[in-house]
Amino acid sequence: MNRLEERGEDDGDENLIGRDAHDHADEFFDHARSEDATAAIRFFLSSIPDERFATEEDVDQGLVKSLTNKKKKKDGTIQETPVTISNSTNLLGFSQFLSMKVVSGKLLQACHNVTTVEELDQVL
């Protein structure tokens, strides 16, 4: 049974995406760790996708063709961007977002001993 069947709703993919985004954002705005942050920061932190960069092992297993995507720009140069793989997807196949617990935990772990703005800039 999928989420639409569980909710007894089927009013289109766009509304489902909107509800999923709203439900996910609510977790961030209601979470105690985010109460001191501004709404803009909470929104930014709530939009981090649960993805990872592809590895050589992923190429060997056939999950991806290469580690980078190559795109030709208008000026003729080639732009390479790293390939990402979703760790979790929703019903429509889009990447899920990291939970506030994961985001705040990783931020605290990375920044727990930062004492200056310069150190914060280096860590992030």
Image (cartoon, rainbow, N blue to C red):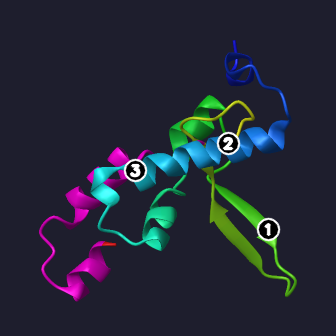
Q: For the residue labelled by badge 3, is the local secondary structure a helix, a strand or a loop?
A: helix
Residue with the mark numbered 3: 30
Q: Position of residue 45 (x, y in %)?
A: 45, 61
Point 44% across, 64% down: residue: 42
**Sooner in the amino-acid sequence: mark 1 or mark 2:** 2
Say above or below: 77 vs 88. Answer: below
Point 70% across, 18% down: residue: 2
Q: Position of residue 19 (x, y in %)?
A: 67, 42
Q: Is residue 57 left or right of residue 93?
A: left
Q: Residues within 10 Å of mark 1 (few under 14, many from 20)?
A: few
Q: Amino acid at mark 3?
A: Asp
Q: Amino acid at mark 1?
A: Lys
Say above or below: 83 vs 88. Answer: below
In three-dimensional space, the C-alpha distance between marks 1 and 2, rounded to whole angstroms, equals 33 Å
Frontmost of labels 1 and 2 is: 2
Residue 65 shows in the view? no
Looking at the rendering, the stretch of residues picked out in magenta corresponds to 96-123
In three-dimensional space, the C-alpha distance between marks 3 and 1, rounded to whole angstroms, equals 40 Å
In three-dimensional space, the C-alpha distance between marks 3 and 2, rounded to whole angstroms, equals 16 Å
Residue with the mark numbered 1: 71
